[in-house]
Image: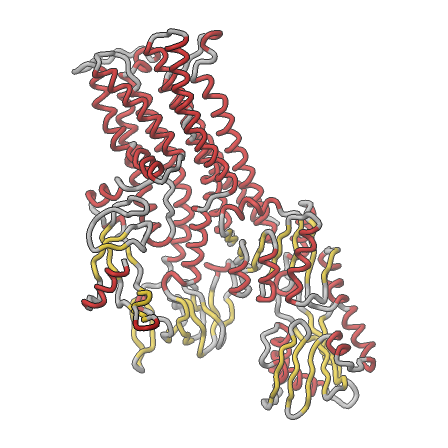
Amino acid sequence: MTEFLVGIWNNKYMENMKVYTCPMHPDVVSDKPGTCPKCGMRLVETEMKMPVRRSLGEGGDHGDIKHGDHVMKETSRMSFWEKFKMSMTMSMGMDHTGLAGREMAKLMEEDIRNKFLISLLLTIPIVLYSPLGMNILNLNLPSPIPVSWLLFLLTTPVYFYCGWIFLYSSYIALKNKTLNMAVLIAVGITAAYVFSVILTLTGSKESFYEAAAMLTTFVLFGHWMEMKSRRGTTDALQALFNLVPPQARVFRNNKEIMVPTADVKLGDVVILKPGDKVPVDGQIIDGETAIDESLVTGESLPVAKKKGDGVIGGSINTSGSVKFKATRIGEDTALAQIVKLVETAQNSKAPGQKIADKFAQYLVIVAVGGGLLTFAIWFLILGQPLMFALTFAISTVVIACPDALGLATPTAVAVGTGLGAKHNILIKDASTLEQTSKIQAIVLDKTGTLTQGKPVITDVIPAKGFAEDDIIKLDAAAEAKSSHPLSLAILEEAKKRKLTIPDKVEGFKNLAGHGVEATVSGKHVLVGTVKLMNDRRIDIKPLQKEIDKLLADGKTIMLLAVDGKIAGVAGALDPIKENAEKAVRRMKELGLEVAMITGDNKKTGEMIGKKLGIDRVFAEVLPEDKAKYVKQLQDEGKFVAMVGDGVNDAPALAQADIGIAIGAGTDVAIETAKVVLMKSDPADILRAIRLSKATVRKMKQNLFWASIYNLLAIPVAAGILYPSFQISLRPEISALLMSISSIIVATNAVLLNRAGKDLVSV
């Protein structure tokens, strides 16, 4: 691939190069048609967006060549022949993430639907002319040619065209030296079809064409239903992505122009006017406004935005005019990442599915071996007629097809992750969706998780010789370079009082978990906790009574020391979120141990904990120590979830068995966590747990049904009940019974949508 791209560069073909690439593996690039060496898919003609940027390594050697995305043509623009060629190289279990993946998923769903309909139309007359129709339905339909040859002509396109995806998937699996469910399905339809052809060629009136046709039809229907359930979710998310405006207003060459949103570049200055939709993610550099972000965050009220605040592509500017710098474009935007996250989760495998896949590998051996053993026992040992033994053998292979087992967890995962996304709960993979149900203890960060994270200054108490405004000025000057919520609160208070903050600040130090230190206008200023003052041997007794009262009221305090002497104390209150108390109560009702962790002082932490009904409070915890307290709970034998929103929560989120990030938090927290709550609502923690429990319940039901079915059905199909009860299953009946189990499993998974009502209420 690298040599090809270098050639493009050297020849200076800078725009819209026609190349051939694999829809599933965009790194596979060729200048000629062919097949993908990784998955066997036919390479499709695409456009490579240029220019190509080349970086040189040391010594002048060519380094990595970065190139634009390879864009797959939309399915709506493909011809029938293009769709047909691609359909012949599609395989089961493909990853359908990214733009090309989504187009491929649409094509694959359309192809499977069409093949199912064709297979169904052909299977109906096959069944009517088969022994099933003649003997059970008492039909005797006229035939222009011998019935066996008519069945051959009708079944052949079903096998080779409609069943091709199973045959090709088996080829890919065997090529990779693996056994999967596609192999079993291929073995089942091939056994029924090939033996039928042999019987037809030898002049026999017996055949199993209806078994091959019915098995193909039913399995196609099951996979069509699975893909519909997956794409329903993806389409809903893609609809959000499509709300991004087609054009953007940008400032270039000292003038305002309109350009396609796809042409917006990183660093471009984008202009938003009232009513405009935000085209890409960015950061405001001029102006103030209010933006409706409900599409992404679920928050119904517009959010006030000013210089330095971020904006999200797809949201709506409701009031003022602003300018912002583009920071994320294309598939890097927040909306695109949400779509990608959900798709990745849907394509990932839960632990239960991995077990099912492993079971299916052995089931291939059991099915083929069981079929051969059944034939050997009935024909060679018991001396039964060839057709008699062959019927039992093929029934055994057909009924062993674990299609229901293959659908058991993917359908539940697809519905579960989609349901979560609809309620602003993003779960990063199937394993997390399953394991969230196991949570026994949950650690909640206080600031930003249980509280609003926007503390307000409520009290300012100066020491003798200082005024209130002096305290605010010095606090604000020292805290100006800090991004801590308390720092923002003191700066907001200074703004409210219209105070001029000293700008001569030197030697600023952020004392993580304790406060800040700086020299303001020649005075040594220390702002922080009681512990910080005690460590620096600063006497706080003059304000001890006031400090105790503020702490007793559940307020967070900031002590100010100037030149080694206590100067004052400011009290702040961070309002508790509306649903926090109710959410904690419901968690405890589920049997969860709920703990709160905070860097705040012990008295304030315990006061907040008491209000919320949390008995176990870890207070005065330094950022680097949060993970230790999570591990402490794990060492007690508990499966622990950590919920946080800040950079300082990232280690604890990583340490926890399940990390849950509040969506309004930092990118670091969101990247580290396995579950993201976009609405920043504590009640969504409860909703995520309920969703996981409901999904796992469906998984277990589906796996139980599918496994029990296979364990019971195979001996019956092999004829174990025939000697005593004269009960036998023809291959077509086996195919019908196999399909019923698949339909039950798929339908049961779709019923998970009923859990949506439970998720809404707290």
Q: Residue at x 66, y 62 (%)?
A: 626
Q: Position of residue 144 (x, y in %)?
A: 16, 15
With 93 as the anchor, is 759 left or right in this view? right
Q: Residue 642, position in %: x, y?
A: 62, 56
Reply above or below: 755 against 602.
Answer: above
Write down the quadrant of residue 662 in the picture: bottom right
Q: What is the quadrant of residue 319 in the picture?
A: bottom left
Q: Residue furthest bottom?
A: 522
Left or right position of 449 against 430: right
Q: Nearer the viewer, residue 82 or 281?
A: 82
Residue furthest left as drawn? 144
Foreground residue among 429 and 444: 429
Q: Residue furthest front?
A: 59
Q: Position of residue 215 (x, y in %)?
A: 35, 26
Q: Could you say where residue 668 lies in the image, as x and y percent from the top left? A: 53, 64
Describe residue 154's horizontal placement relative to residue 692 as left or right: left
